[in-house]
Image (cartoon, rainbow, N blue to C red):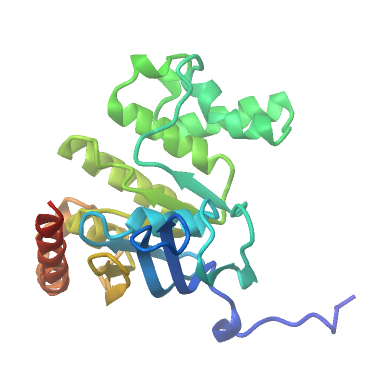
Amino acid sequence: MTNINKRYLPVEEIPPALSLKQIGYHFGGGHQQGADYLAIADTSLSVAGGEFVSVVGPTGCGKSTLLNLAAGLLMPTAGEVQVFGQRLSGLNTRAGYMFQNEVLLPWRTASENILLGLQYRGVDKQSQRQQARYWLARVGLTAFADCYPHQLSGGMRKRVALAQMLILDPDIILMDEPFSSLDIQTRYLMENELLALWEAKKKAVLFITHDLDEAIALSDRVIVLSAGPASHPVGEFSINLPRPRDVNEIRHQPQFIALHAAIWDVLRNEVLTGYQQQQQRG
């Protein structure tokens, strides 16, 4: 029987997967003079379901702070974070977080590290093993299932960390400069691997990077943050490059080069401002 009471939201009414509304965040001890540092001020941004959004900005501008607010690891001192239209008041349980440095347990094999989150969720052991085998294959590490982190290359450890997050099937993926420590060849491979996995399920992604080339090659939109203190968005750019993409090949396309020039024109001023501020503090 048809449920005549079921209501489908028009596209324009579907809430973003992640929305930061006029966010502010202070570091420091209360309101004593000189004790506070206003890291983020009056910042609004959103990530729709299936959208890949990157944030770039000068060193120390609060990019990671923004991601920690989205994850619920920090609570904003102004504004609010919404997840699928609902105010976030604790940890963002619909998000997976991939840190800059992989946090693998050295006494566990690649397979055991990948299924760790399933163990915490109480998933039965047979399902844990099946899903771990599936994700080992997806990231090309089937032959290394029983290797420990110290036996794996940097790129392999990143693949384990990626599978460790994706096995939990998060609706939102938060990534904090996950490939910055890799050599350039391995980095290209990991960026393409990420795009292939993202294309398969089209999760919402908020990606933090200091690398403008990486941001453009991966994203649907790139947001530029100002230099701190009181960092806030100063530019937003749609990346209308065709998909699927090869992150190395696309860098040579005229449209990519034009986008890079336009975004760098905004970002350069903020980098110079940040550098001048650091010199003054030094």
Q: Nearer the viewer, residue 10 or 270?
A: 270
Callout count: 0
Q: Where residue 251 appears, x then y in whole percent?
A: 14, 58
Q: Where residue 192 appears, x then y in whole percent?
A: 30, 47
Which residue shows up at 59% across the image and 54% down it? 92
- From this view, report whether residue 92 is shown above or below residue 271: above
Q: Is residue 111 left or right of residue 57?
A: right
Q: Where residue 21 appears, x then y in whole percent?
A: 49, 75
Which residue shows up at 63% across the image and 69% down it? 87
Q: Nearer the viewer, residue 7 or 172?
A: 172
Residue extending furthest toward the front: 33
Which residue shows up at 46% across the image and 53% down it? 68
- From this view, report whether residue 100 is shown above or below residue 137: below
Residue 231 is at least partly visible in this image: yes
Q: Is residue 187 left or right of residue 41?
A: left
Which residue shows up at 43% across the image and 15% down it? 148
The quarter of the rendered structure image containing the N terminus is: bottom right
Q: Where residue 151 appears, x then y in whole percent?
A: 35, 14
Residue 202 is at least partly visible in this image: no
Q: Nearer the viewer, residue 64 or 182?
A: 64
Q: Nearer the viewer, residue 144 or 46?
A: 46
For residue 147, what is the image quadrant? top left
